[in-house]
Image (cartoon, rainbow, N blue to C red):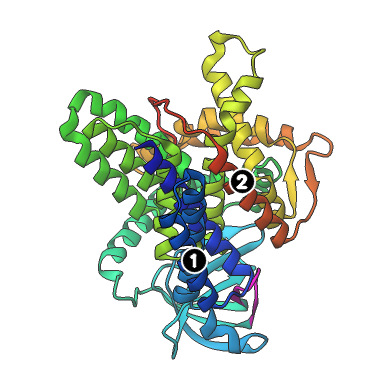
Amino acid sequence: MHNLGRATQYACVGFLIGVCVAGFVAIQPLYLIIGAAVFACLGICSRPLWIRRISVFAVSLSIGAICLQARSSQSVWLQYVGQSYQGIAVVTSEQEEYGRFNSFSARPDGFSNNIKVSFIGTTEVTYGATIFLSGVVSHSQGRFIELRAQRVLVLSRKCNLSSCWYMQPLVSLRNMTKKQLVQNVGELGTVAYSLLFGGSSGINPDIIQVFRVTGLSHVLAVSGYNISIILTALVFIRRSWGKRALVILSVTLVIYCALSGFSASVVRATCMGVVYLIGAGIGRMYLAGHALLLAACVMVFVSPEIILFNPSFQFSFIASAGIILLAPVVLSGLWCIPKKLKKLKLQIATSLSAVLATIPLQIYLFSGFSLIAVPANLVMFMVIPLLMLLALLSSLPFIGVWFGYLFSELFALCVWVLHLFGQIPNAYLPISISSYLTLVAYILLLLFWLLHKDSSDESNTPTV
Protein backbone atom coordinates (compact mmCIF):
# COMPACT_ATOMS: atom_id res chain seq x y z
CA MET A 1 0.00 0.00 0.00
CA HIS A 2 2.91 2.33 0.77
CA ASN A 3 4.42 1.76 -2.69
CA LEU A 4 1.03 2.37 -4.29
CA GLY A 5 0.71 5.65 -2.36
CA ARG A 6 4.16 6.79 -3.44
CA ALA A 7 3.41 5.85 -7.06
CA THR A 8 0.25 7.95 -6.87
CA GLN A 9 2.32 10.88 -5.59
CA TYR A 10 4.76 10.57 -8.49
CA ALA A 11 1.86 10.36 -10.95
CA CYS A 12 0.09 13.43 -9.52
CA VAL A 13 3.23 15.57 -9.32
CA GLY A 14 4.27 14.54 -12.85
CA PHE A 15 0.83 15.39 -14.21
CA LEU A 16 0.81 18.85 -12.60
CA ILE A 17 4.33 19.67 -13.79
CA GLY A 18 3.41 18.49 -17.30
CA VAL A 19 0.48 20.90 -17.45
CA CYS A 20 2.66 23.77 -16.15
CA VAL A 21 5.51 23.15 -18.61
CA ALA A 22 3.13 22.80 -21.58
CA GLY A 23 1.71 26.21 -20.73
CA PHE A 24 5.09 27.84 -21.36
CA VAL A 25 6.82 25.53 -23.86
CA ALA A 26 5.31 24.28 -27.13
CA ILE A 27 5.85 20.50 -27.40
CA GLN A 28 4.66 18.40 -30.32
CA PRO A 29 2.01 15.87 -29.17
CA LEU A 30 3.73 13.13 -31.21
CA TYR A 31 6.94 13.54 -29.20
CA LEU A 32 4.96 13.39 -25.98
CA ILE A 33 3.20 10.18 -27.01
CA ILE A 34 6.49 8.56 -28.05
CA GLY A 35 8.16 9.62 -24.80
CA ALA A 36 5.26 8.27 -22.74
CA ALA A 37 5.39 4.94 -24.59
CA VAL A 38 9.16 4.60 -24.10
CA PHE A 39 9.01 5.30 -20.37
CA ALA A 40 5.96 3.03 -19.97
CA CYS A 41 7.90 0.15 -21.51
CA LEU A 42 10.92 0.99 -19.35
CA GLY A 43 8.81 0.91 -16.20
CA ILE A 44 7.15 -2.39 -17.11
CA CYS A 45 10.44 -4.11 -17.98
CA SER A 46 12.50 -2.77 -15.05
CA ARG A 47 12.67 -4.22 -11.55
CA PRO A 48 14.35 -1.42 -9.57
CA LEU A 49 11.68 0.58 -7.75
CA TRP A 50 13.30 3.96 -8.46
CA ILE A 51 13.21 3.34 -12.23
CA ARG A 52 9.52 2.46 -12.04
CA ARG A 53 8.78 5.65 -10.12
CA ILE A 54 10.67 7.77 -12.64
CA SER A 55 8.72 6.03 -15.42
CA VAL A 56 5.41 6.80 -13.69
CA PHE A 57 6.52 10.42 -13.28
CA ALA A 58 7.57 10.76 -16.95
CA VAL A 59 4.41 9.12 -18.32
CA SER A 60 2.21 11.32 -16.11
CA LEU A 61 4.16 14.41 -17.18
CA SER A 62 3.46 13.58 -20.84
CA ILE A 63 -0.22 12.98 -20.06
CA GLY A 64 -0.42 16.37 -18.33
CA ALA A 65 1.12 18.18 -21.30
CA ILE A 66 -1.17 16.36 -23.74
CA CYS A 67 -4.20 17.12 -21.54
CA LEU A 68 -3.48 20.84 -21.62
CA GLN A 69 -3.00 20.92 -25.39
CA ALA A 70 -6.06 18.78 -26.08
CA ARG A 71 -8.47 20.51 -23.72
CA SER A 72 -7.23 24.08 -23.86
CA SER A 73 -9.14 26.64 -25.89
CA GLN A 74 -6.01 28.70 -26.49
CA SER A 75 -5.42 27.47 -30.07
CA VAL A 76 -8.76 28.95 -31.13
CA TRP A 77 -7.68 32.43 -30.02
CA LEU A 78 -4.08 32.26 -31.24
CA GLN A 79 -4.96 33.74 -34.63
CA TYR A 80 -6.56 36.78 -32.94
CA VAL A 81 -3.52 37.80 -30.83
CA GLY A 82 -2.81 41.50 -31.32
CA GLN A 83 -6.25 42.21 -32.75
CA SER A 84 -8.98 44.32 -31.18
CA TYR A 85 -12.26 42.72 -30.15
CA GLN A 86 -15.59 44.41 -29.57
CA GLY A 87 -18.85 42.56 -29.08
CA ILE A 88 -21.32 40.72 -26.86
CA ALA A 89 -20.31 37.85 -24.57
CA VAL A 90 -21.74 35.66 -21.80
CA VAL A 91 -19.87 35.34 -18.49
CA THR A 92 -18.99 31.68 -17.80
CA SER A 93 -17.25 31.98 -14.41
CA GLU A 94 -17.35 34.00 -11.23
CA GLN A 95 -15.31 37.19 -11.16
CA GLU A 96 -12.01 37.00 -9.28
CA GLU A 97 -9.68 39.77 -8.17
CA TYR A 98 -5.89 39.84 -7.80
CA GLY A 99 -3.80 42.94 -7.43
CA ARG A 100 -5.32 45.76 -9.46
CA PHE A 101 -6.96 43.36 -11.91
CA ASN A 102 -10.34 41.67 -12.12
CA SER A 103 -10.69 38.55 -14.21
CA PHE A 104 -13.36 36.13 -15.39
CA SER A 105 -14.05 33.77 -18.28
CA ALA A 106 -16.48 34.70 -21.04
CA ARG A 107 -17.84 33.17 -24.24
CA PRO A 108 -18.11 35.76 -27.03
CA ASP A 109 -20.98 35.52 -29.51
CA GLY A 110 -20.07 33.37 -32.49
CA PHE A 111 -17.50 31.31 -30.55
CA SER A 112 -17.85 27.99 -28.78
CA ASN A 113 -14.75 28.51 -26.61
CA ASN A 114 -14.16 30.65 -23.55
CA ILE A 115 -11.49 33.28 -23.16
CA LYS A 116 -10.05 34.81 -20.01
CA VAL A 117 -10.96 38.50 -19.63
CA SER A 118 -8.95 40.84 -17.41
CA PHE A 119 -9.65 44.50 -16.72
CA ILE A 120 -9.02 47.31 -14.25
CA GLY A 121 -12.16 48.84 -12.82
CA THR A 122 -15.06 48.51 -10.42
CA THR A 123 -17.56 46.79 -12.73
CA GLU A 124 -19.02 43.69 -11.08
CA VAL A 125 -20.10 40.85 -13.36
CA THR A 126 -22.05 37.75 -12.35
CA TYR A 127 -22.18 34.19 -13.65
CA GLY A 128 -24.30 33.90 -16.79
CA ALA A 129 -24.65 37.66 -17.31
CA THR A 130 -24.64 39.19 -20.81
CA ILE A 131 -21.93 41.83 -21.21
CA PHE A 132 -20.36 44.10 -23.82
CA LEU A 133 -16.59 43.77 -24.18
CA SER A 134 -14.06 46.01 -25.85
CA GLY A 135 -10.33 45.27 -25.74
CA VAL A 136 -7.27 43.61 -27.27
CA VAL A 137 -6.47 39.88 -27.46
CA SER A 138 -2.93 39.36 -26.17
CA HIS A 139 -0.61 36.94 -24.38
CA SER A 140 -0.92 37.01 -20.60
CA GLN A 141 1.75 34.65 -19.27
CA GLY A 142 3.66 31.93 -21.03
CA ARG A 143 1.66 30.81 -24.05
CA PHE A 144 -1.73 31.73 -22.58
CA ILE A 145 -4.03 34.24 -24.20
CA GLU A 146 -6.44 36.70 -22.63
CA LEU A 147 -8.65 39.59 -23.62
CA ARG A 148 -7.40 42.76 -21.94
CA ALA A 149 -10.58 44.74 -21.81
CA GLN A 150 -10.68 48.52 -21.81
CA ARG A 151 -14.44 48.47 -21.34
CA VAL A 152 -16.80 46.02 -19.64
CA LEU A 153 -20.50 46.90 -19.66
CA VAL A 154 -23.20 44.70 -18.10
CA LEU A 155 -26.20 44.50 -20.44
CA SER A 156 -28.25 41.95 -18.49
CA ARG A 157 -27.67 40.08 -15.24
CA LYS A 158 -30.18 37.38 -16.20
CA CYS A 159 -28.41 34.02 -16.42
CA ASN A 160 -28.17 32.82 -20.02
CA LEU A 161 -26.35 29.49 -19.63
CA SER A 162 -27.67 25.93 -19.54
CA SER A 163 -26.29 25.52 -16.00
CA CYS A 164 -28.33 28.48 -14.74
CA TRP A 165 -31.17 26.27 -13.53
CA TYR A 166 -29.16 25.48 -10.40
CA MET A 167 -26.82 28.50 -10.28
CA GLN A 168 -29.51 31.17 -10.53
CA PRO A 169 -31.19 30.30 -7.17
CA LEU A 170 -27.76 30.31 -5.50
CA VAL A 171 -26.87 33.69 -7.01
CA SER A 172 -30.25 35.05 -5.89
CA LEU A 173 -29.65 33.78 -2.35
CA ARG A 174 -26.21 35.40 -2.26
CA ASN A 175 -27.62 38.70 -3.51
CA MET A 176 -30.36 38.62 -0.85
CA THR A 177 -27.74 37.92 1.82
CA LYS A 178 -25.57 40.80 0.60
CA LYS A 179 -28.52 43.18 0.61
CA GLN A 180 -29.46 42.13 4.16
CA LEU A 181 -25.86 42.54 5.35
CA VAL A 182 -25.58 46.03 3.87
CA GLN A 183 -28.87 46.93 5.55
CA ASN A 184 -27.87 45.55 8.98
CA VAL A 185 -24.13 46.32 9.04
CA GLY A 186 -23.98 49.46 6.92
CA GLU A 187 -20.82 50.41 5.03
CA LEU A 188 -19.00 47.31 6.27
CA GLY A 189 -21.77 45.02 4.96
CA THR A 190 -19.69 44.33 1.84
CA VAL A 191 -16.79 43.27 4.09
CA ALA A 192 -19.06 40.88 5.99
CA TYR A 193 -20.26 39.45 2.68
CA SER A 194 -16.64 39.01 1.49
CA LEU A 195 -15.74 37.06 4.62
CA LEU A 196 -18.63 34.68 3.98
CA PHE A 197 -18.64 34.32 0.19
CA GLY A 198 -15.53 36.12 -1.14
CA GLY A 199 -15.06 39.04 -3.52
CA SER A 200 -13.97 42.57 -2.64
CA SER A 201 -16.39 44.49 -4.86
CA GLY A 202 -17.80 47.55 -3.10
CA ILE A 203 -15.26 47.52 -0.26
CA ASN A 204 -13.59 50.81 0.64
CA PRO A 205 -10.28 51.02 -1.35
CA ASP A 206 -8.47 52.17 1.82
CA ILE A 207 -9.43 48.92 3.58
CA ILE A 208 -8.28 46.87 0.60
CA GLN A 209 -4.94 48.72 0.61
CA VAL A 210 -4.43 48.07 4.33
CA PHE A 211 -5.03 44.35 3.82
CA ARG A 212 -2.71 44.30 0.81
CA VAL A 213 0.18 46.04 2.58
CA THR A 214 -0.07 43.65 5.52
CA GLY A 215 -0.26 40.55 3.29
CA LEU A 216 -3.88 39.78 4.15
CA SER A 217 -5.59 40.12 0.76
CA HIS A 218 -6.65 36.47 1.02
CA VAL A 219 -8.86 37.31 4.02
CA LEU A 220 -11.25 39.20 1.71
CA ALA A 221 -11.40 36.21 -0.65
CA VAL A 222 -13.12 33.09 0.64
CA SER A 223 -10.49 30.36 0.89
CA GLY A 224 -9.59 27.00 2.36
CA TYR A 225 -9.34 28.63 5.79
CA ASN A 226 -13.09 29.31 5.69
CA ILE A 227 -13.68 25.62 4.96
CA SER A 228 -11.33 24.69 7.83
CA ILE A 229 -13.42 26.74 10.25
CA ILE A 230 -16.67 25.21 8.99
CA LEU A 231 -15.20 21.68 8.96
CA THR A 232 -13.89 22.05 12.52
CA ALA A 233 -17.37 23.06 13.67
CA LEU A 234 -18.94 20.18 11.73
CA VAL A 235 -16.48 17.65 13.18
CA PHE A 236 -17.41 18.88 16.67
CA ILE A 237 -21.11 18.38 15.84
CA ARG A 238 -20.38 14.93 14.36
CA ARG A 239 -19.07 13.72 17.72
CA SER A 240 -22.59 14.17 19.05
CA TRP A 241 -24.46 12.89 15.99
CA GLY A 242 -22.30 9.88 15.13
CA LYS A 243 -21.29 8.48 11.74
CA ARG A 244 -24.78 8.87 10.30
CA ALA A 245 -24.18 12.60 10.14
CA LEU A 246 -21.28 12.25 7.66
CA VAL A 247 -23.55 12.53 4.63
CA ILE A 248 -25.23 15.65 6.04
CA LEU A 249 -21.85 17.22 6.82
CA SER A 250 -20.51 16.49 3.32
CA VAL A 251 -23.65 17.97 1.73
CA THR A 252 -23.24 21.06 3.93
CA LEU A 253 -19.71 21.61 2.60
CA VAL A 254 -20.88 21.19 -1.00
CA ILE A 255 -23.73 23.68 -0.49
CA TYR A 256 -21.33 26.25 0.97
CA CYS A 257 -18.99 25.62 -1.98
CA ALA A 258 -21.87 26.38 -4.35
CA LEU A 259 -22.84 29.52 -2.43
CA SER A 260 -19.26 30.78 -2.73
CA GLY A 261 -19.60 30.55 -6.52
CA PHE A 262 -17.44 27.40 -6.81
CA SER A 263 -14.30 29.42 -6.16
CA ALA A 264 -11.25 27.31 -7.03
CA SER A 265 -9.81 27.55 -3.51
CA VAL A 266 -13.13 26.50 -1.94
CA VAL A 267 -13.62 23.62 -4.41
CA ARG A 268 -10.12 22.37 -3.55
CA ALA A 269 -10.74 22.63 0.20
CA THR A 270 -14.21 21.07 -0.12
CA CYS A 271 -12.76 18.05 -1.96
CA MET A 272 -10.21 17.56 0.83
CA GLY A 273 -12.86 18.06 3.49
CA VAL A 274 -15.16 15.47 1.95
CA VAL A 275 -12.22 13.03 1.68
CA TYR A 276 -11.53 13.60 5.39
CA LEU A 277 -15.17 12.94 6.33
CA ILE A 278 -15.32 9.78 4.20
CA GLY A 279 -12.07 8.55 5.74
CA ALA A 280 -13.42 9.22 9.23
CA GLY A 281 -16.57 7.30 8.34
CA ILE A 282 -14.78 4.18 7.11
CA GLY A 283 -11.98 4.32 9.68
CA ARG A 284 -9.13 5.24 7.31
CA MET A 285 -6.30 7.61 8.17
CA TYR A 286 -6.43 11.04 6.53
CA LEU A 287 -3.19 12.12 4.81
CA ALA A 288 -3.49 15.77 3.81
CA GLY A 289 -0.69 15.54 1.24
CA HIS A 290 -2.38 12.76 -0.72
CA ALA A 291 -5.77 14.46 -0.49
CA LEU A 292 -4.32 17.78 -1.74
CA LEU A 293 -2.55 16.20 -4.72
CA LEU A 294 -5.61 14.19 -5.75
CA ALA A 295 -7.91 17.21 -5.43
CA ALA A 296 -5.51 19.34 -7.49
CA CYS A 297 -5.17 16.70 -10.22
CA VAL A 298 -8.94 16.25 -10.53
CA MET A 299 -9.50 20.00 -10.80
CA VAL A 300 -6.66 20.48 -13.30
CA PHE A 301 -7.87 17.55 -15.40
CA VAL A 302 -11.35 19.11 -15.59
CA SER A 303 -9.94 22.57 -16.35
CA PRO A 304 -6.19 22.40 -17.20
CA GLU A 305 -5.79 26.15 -17.54
CA ILE A 306 -6.73 26.71 -13.89
CA ILE A 307 -3.23 25.91 -12.65
CA LEU A 308 -1.62 28.67 -14.70
CA PHE A 309 -3.90 31.68 -14.53
CA ASN A 310 -6.33 31.21 -11.66
CA PRO A 311 -4.81 33.06 -8.65
CA SER A 312 -7.39 31.60 -6.28
CA PHE A 313 -6.32 28.03 -7.12
CA GLN A 314 -2.63 28.93 -7.13
CA PHE A 315 -2.64 30.57 -3.69
CA SER A 316 -4.85 27.86 -2.21
CA PHE A 317 -2.79 24.92 -3.51
CA ILE A 318 0.63 26.47 -2.81
CA ALA A 319 -0.27 27.68 0.69
CA SER A 320 -1.66 24.22 1.58
CA ALA A 321 1.43 22.52 0.15
CA GLY A 322 3.63 24.89 2.13
CA ILE A 323 1.83 24.04 5.36
CA ILE A 324 2.12 20.30 4.72
CA LEU A 325 5.78 20.39 3.69
CA LEU A 326 7.29 23.24 5.72
CA ALA A 327 5.26 23.31 8.95
CA PRO A 328 7.10 20.32 10.53
CA VAL A 329 10.45 21.98 9.81
CA VAL A 330 9.29 25.35 11.16
CA LEU A 331 7.81 23.69 14.27
CA SER A 332 11.16 22.10 15.10
CA GLY A 333 12.77 25.53 14.85
CA LEU A 334 10.35 27.05 17.36
CA TRP A 335 11.81 25.11 20.27
CA CYS A 336 12.09 28.32 22.32
CA ILE A 337 8.29 28.57 22.67
CA PRO A 338 7.15 26.69 25.81
CA LYS A 339 4.92 23.63 25.50
CA LYS A 340 2.14 25.44 27.36
CA LEU A 341 1.72 27.64 24.28
CA LYS A 342 1.37 24.68 21.93
CA LYS A 343 -1.58 26.15 19.99
CA LEU A 344 0.22 29.47 19.48
CA LYS A 345 3.33 27.61 18.32
CA LEU A 346 1.29 25.62 15.81
CA GLN A 347 -0.43 28.77 14.53
CA ILE A 348 2.91 30.56 14.06
CA ALA A 349 4.34 27.56 12.18
CA THR A 350 1.24 27.32 9.97
CA SER A 351 1.20 31.02 9.11
CA LEU A 352 4.95 31.19 8.49
CA SER A 353 4.89 28.08 6.27
CA ALA A 354 2.02 29.41 4.13
CA VAL A 355 3.66 32.84 3.78
CA LEU A 356 7.06 31.39 2.85
CA ALA A 357 5.55 29.08 0.22
CA THR A 358 3.54 31.85 -1.46
CA ILE A 359 6.30 34.51 -1.54
CA PRO A 360 7.18 33.98 -5.26
CA LEU A 361 3.50 34.06 -6.29
CA GLN A 362 2.78 37.18 -4.21
CA ILE A 363 5.75 38.97 -5.75
CA TYR A 364 4.69 37.95 -9.27
CA LEU A 365 1.03 38.93 -8.93
CA PHE A 366 1.29 41.98 -6.68
CA SER A 367 4.79 43.25 -7.59
CA GLY A 368 5.73 43.28 -3.93
CA PHE A 369 5.83 41.41 -0.65
CA SER A 370 4.72 42.27 2.89
CA LEU A 371 7.45 41.81 5.49
CA ILE A 372 4.88 41.86 8.29
CA ALA A 373 2.58 39.22 6.81
CA VAL A 374 3.26 36.63 9.53
CA PRO A 375 2.37 38.74 12.63
CA ALA A 376 -0.58 40.28 10.76
CA ASN A 377 -1.86 36.82 9.82
CA LEU A 378 -1.54 35.66 13.42
CA VAL A 379 -3.69 38.54 14.62
CA MET A 380 -6.38 38.04 11.98
CA PHE A 381 -6.49 34.23 12.18
CA MET A 382 -7.46 34.51 15.84
CA VAL A 383 -10.35 36.84 14.99
CA ILE A 384 -11.63 35.52 11.62
CA PRO A 385 -13.80 32.69 13.08
CA LEU A 386 -15.59 35.21 15.33
CA LEU A 387 -15.93 37.72 12.47
CA MET A 388 -17.43 35.00 10.23
CA LEU A 389 -19.92 34.03 12.94
CA LEU A 390 -20.95 37.64 13.50
CA ALA A 391 -21.24 38.20 9.72
CA LEU A 392 -23.50 35.15 9.43
CA LEU A 393 -25.70 36.28 12.33
CA SER A 394 -25.80 39.80 10.89
CA SER A 395 -27.60 38.45 7.81
CA LEU A 396 -30.61 37.48 9.94
CA PRO A 397 -33.68 39.74 9.81
CA PHE A 398 -34.61 41.86 12.83
CA ILE A 399 -31.89 40.71 15.28
CA GLY A 400 -29.14 40.99 12.65
CA VAL A 401 -28.73 44.72 13.39
CA TRP A 402 -27.33 43.99 16.86
CA PHE A 403 -24.82 41.47 15.56
CA GLY A 404 -23.97 43.90 12.75
CA TYR A 405 -22.98 46.49 15.37
CA LEU A 406 -20.69 43.98 17.09
CA PHE A 407 -19.18 43.03 13.72
CA SER A 408 -18.49 46.67 12.83
CA GLU A 409 -16.79 47.39 16.15
CA LEU A 410 -14.61 44.26 16.04
CA PHE A 411 -13.62 44.79 12.40
CA ALA A 412 -12.81 48.47 13.08
CA LEU A 413 -10.49 47.32 15.88
CA CYS A 414 -8.78 44.87 13.49
CA VAL A 415 -8.28 47.60 10.87
CA TRP A 416 -6.80 49.90 13.54
CA VAL A 417 -4.28 47.18 14.54
CA LEU A 418 -3.42 46.52 10.88
CA HIS A 419 -2.91 50.27 10.37
CA LEU A 420 -0.28 50.14 13.11
CA PHE A 421 1.44 47.25 11.33
CA GLY A 422 1.25 49.11 8.02
CA GLN A 423 2.98 52.18 9.49
CA ILE A 424 6.13 50.19 10.25
CA PRO A 425 8.92 51.55 7.97
CA ASN A 426 9.53 49.41 4.87
CA ALA A 427 6.67 47.08 5.81
CA TYR A 428 5.93 46.48 2.12
CA LEU A 429 8.82 45.59 -0.18
CA PRO A 430 8.18 46.46 -3.86
CA ILE A 431 9.85 43.86 -6.08
CA SER A 432 9.04 42.06 -9.32
CA ILE A 433 9.67 38.59 -10.69
CA SER A 434 9.08 36.97 -14.10
CA SER A 435 6.47 34.29 -14.69
CA TYR A 436 9.19 31.85 -15.81
CA LEU A 437 11.13 32.22 -12.55
CA THR A 438 7.90 31.75 -10.61
CA LEU A 439 7.21 28.57 -12.59
CA VAL A 440 10.70 27.20 -11.86
CA ALA A 441 10.29 27.95 -8.13
CA TYR A 442 7.08 25.94 -7.88
CA ILE A 443 8.28 23.08 -10.05
CA LEU A 444 11.15 22.74 -7.55
CA LEU A 445 8.56 22.76 -4.74
CA LEU A 446 6.65 19.91 -6.43
CA LEU A 447 9.87 17.94 -6.97
CA PHE A 448 10.75 18.46 -3.31
CA TRP A 449 7.36 16.92 -2.51
CA LEU A 450 8.51 13.65 -4.09
CA LEU A 451 11.45 13.50 -1.70
CA HIS A 452 9.27 14.38 1.25
CA LYS A 453 8.59 11.50 3.61
CA ASP A 454 4.91 10.72 4.06
CA SER A 455 3.48 11.80 7.36
CA SER A 456 1.41 9.23 9.20
CA ASP A 457 0.19 11.62 11.85
CA GLU A 458 -3.54 12.03 11.94
CA SER A 459 -4.66 15.45 13.05
CA ASN A 460 -7.88 16.18 14.88
CA THR A 461 -8.28 19.28 12.79
CA PRO A 462 -7.58 18.31 9.19
CA THR A 463 -5.51 20.42 6.87
CA VAL A 464 -7.80 21.65 4.09
Tell me which segment is drawn in magenta: 137-147
Q: Residues within 10 Å of mark 2 (few under 14, many from 20)?
A: some
Q: Quadrant of residue 27?
A: bottom right
Q: Position of residue 151 (x, y in %)?
A: 61, 78
Q: Residue furthest left?
A: 244
Residue type of the residue flagged with mark 2: Leu
Query: Which-is-in-front pick, marks 1 and 2?
Result: 1
Q: Quadrant of residue 395?
A: top left
Q: Which residue is mark 1?
A: 38
* Residue for point 53% across, 15% down: 342
Q: Secondary structure at mark 1?
A: helix
Residue 142 higher or lower than 15, as above or below: below
Q: Is residue 138 magenta?
A: yes
Q: With 438 as the anchor, is 388 left or right in this view?
A: left
- The relative height of residue 226 versus residue 103 in the rendered view (above or below) is above
What residue is shown with label 2? 445
- The residue under label 1 is which amino acid type? Val
Residue at x 20%, y 41% (from the top left corner): 247
Res 310 visible: no
Q: CA distance from mark 1 to mark 2?
A: 27 Å
* Residue 47 % position (x, y): 44, 47
Name the element at disc 2.
helix
